[in-house]
Image: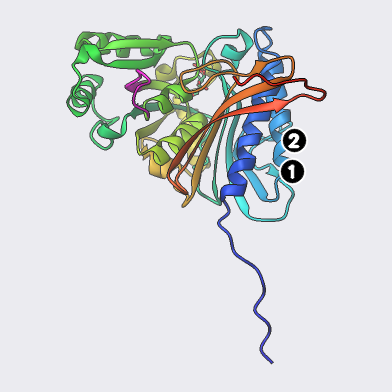
């Protein structure tokens, strides 16, 4: 006898239900760390976001896996790389998370901190090592035309042509770091304007994907894991994003790497299976899954959305979900009503 056809609908691991839950994950993380913003408590703000993110993820029916998180298991108690999240049944979903991107910005209540994550089907996000990454982000009109292998001068000329803007109408975001001294001089020599940022290059990268943000390009070196989250958003937006790992401490110029050597870092990369350390990764390689979703919720006010607002009767969050599932960007304002609330103002 023929066995009956099982009544199971195979759904994409990343569907609209999951997307709604993912939105709630970043909202909860943003609210938790916003309670600590401005207190100068960087680690505490991060820990609060991590805990809230993990708790909300636990309620999602999925077999979730952290591929980019707070670090290796021994250094991160929660949301460590390889950690399984979710209910343990349901579709397999990979996550790259940064529960409090721009922790310094959050700790000192400055613009641009947000809770972010990228989600994809299994294997859809590059397991970026905890290294630095040279990044180039630009608007969709310049996608595939600017190139991280070209000089800043050449890329600014291309950007200018693609966007129909003169150099002095372009704004290039660069993290304010010693390692960018020459890059900043080169950009200034082209006539383009620099927007220095102290932290938070994920927001700057994604802002390049939208017209009207006043941000035309991100150049320079930031953290590699966050590069994957930026790439996921930019892939779904059709914007340009490329990344190249940085392994030479002389290039990274960071106190974080005081004890590292170039040779040692190259050996670490080889151990991780990265055979070509100079490879240029395209957005579509960093976030290669069939379905890729980015979700971010503001902790403090930023370029893309506002931060958390605590009010008498409610808490408000502002978020953005970008999905290649249905080619949408959803800007969401959520009112989280408090127990015993009297009335909620319209806005
Ligand atoms: C941070 C952070 C960025 O890169 O600066 C970090 O603000 C690494 O740079 O948003 P430093 O070690 O020089 O501070 C990001 O996390 C993301 O790329």
Q: Is residue 300 above or below residue 63?
A: above
Q: Is residue 163 above or below residue 274?
A: above
Which residue is nearer to you in this view: 79 or 331? Answer: 331
Which disc is residue 59 wearing?
Answer: 1
Which disc is residue 306 wearing?
Answer: none
Left or right: where 318 falls relative to 25: left
Q: Residue 129 location, x and y as percent?
A: 52, 34
Residue at the farthest bottom position: 1
User: For the residue labelled by badge 1, is the local secondary structure a helix, a strand or a loop?
Assistant: loop
Instruction: Tell me the quadrant of the picture where the N terminus can be found.
Output: bottom right
Q: Residue 341 location, x and y as percent?
A: 78, 22
User: For the residue labelled by badge 2, is the local secondary structure a helix, a strand or a loop?
Assistant: helix
Q: Which residues are the magenta region?
A: 210-218
Residue at figure coordinates x 37%, y 28% from the top left: 210
Say whether residue 196 is visible. Answer: yes
Left or right: where 135 falls relative to 78: left
Instruction: Tell me the quadrant of the picture where the C terminus can be found.
Output: top right
The quarter of the displayed image where residue 85 is located:
top right
Residue 163 covered by magenta stretch: no
Q: Are marks 1 and 2 in contact (CB under 8 Å)?
A: yes
Q: Residue 253 location, x and y as percent?
A: 45, 14
Q: Residue 220 location, x and y as percent?
A: 37, 20
Q: What is the number of callouts on the image?
A: 2
Q: Which residue is mark 2?
A: 55
Badge 2, how many Cα within 10 Å: few under 14, some, many 20+? some
Left or right: where 267 falls relative to 98: left
Badge 1, how many Cα within 10 Å: few under 14, some, many 20+? some
Residue 212 covered by magenta stretch: yes
Which residue is nearer to you in this view: 287 or 306? Answer: 306
The quarter of the displayed image where residue 76 is located:
top right
Q: Is residue 133 above or below residue 19?
A: above
Q: Main secondary structure of the magenta part?
A: loop
């Amino acid at each position: 006898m023929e066995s009956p056809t099982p009544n199971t609908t195979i759904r994409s691991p990343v569907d609209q239900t999951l997307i709604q839950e993912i939105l709630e994950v970043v909202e909860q993380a943003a609210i938790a760390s916003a309670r600590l913003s401005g207190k100068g408590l960087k680690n505490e703000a991060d820990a609060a976001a991590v805990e809230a993110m993990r708790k909300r993820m636990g309620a999602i029916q999925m077999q979730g896996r952290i591929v980019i998180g707070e670090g290796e298991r021994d250094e991160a108690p929660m949301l460590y790389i390889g950690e399984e999240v979710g209910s343990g049944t349901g579709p397999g979903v990979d996550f790259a998370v940064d529960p409090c991107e721009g922790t310094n910005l959050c700790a000192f209540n400055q613009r641009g901190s947000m809770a972010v994550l990228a989600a994809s089907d299994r294997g859809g996000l590059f397991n970026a090592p905890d290294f630095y990454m040279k990044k180039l982000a630009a608007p969709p009109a310049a996608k595939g035309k600017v190139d991280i292998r070209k000089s800043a001068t050449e890329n600014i000329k291309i950007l200018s042509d693609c966007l129909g803007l003169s150099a002095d109408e372009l704004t290039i975001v660069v993290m304010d770091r010693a390692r960018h001294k020459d890059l900043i001089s080169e950009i200034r020599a082209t006539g383009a304007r620099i927007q220095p940022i102290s932290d938070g290059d994920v927001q700057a990268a994604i802002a390049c994907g939208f017209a009207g943000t006043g941000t035309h390009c991100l150049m320079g070196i930031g953290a590699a894991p966050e590069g994957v989250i930026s790439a996921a958003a930019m892939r779904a937006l059709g914007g340009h994003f490329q990344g190249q790992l940085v392994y030479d401490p002389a290039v990274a110029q960071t106190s974080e790497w005081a004890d590292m050597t170039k040779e040692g870092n190259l050996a670490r990369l080889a151990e991780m299976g990265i055979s070509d350390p100079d490879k240029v990764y395209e957005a579509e390689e960093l976030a290669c899954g069939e379905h890729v979703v980015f979700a971010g919720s503001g902790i403090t006010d930023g370029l893309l959305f506002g931060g958390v607002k605590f009010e008498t009767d409610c808490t408000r969050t502002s978020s953005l979900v970008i999905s290649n599932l249905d080619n949408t960007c959803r800007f969401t304002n959520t009112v989280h009503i408090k127990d015993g609330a009297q009335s909620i103002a319209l806005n």
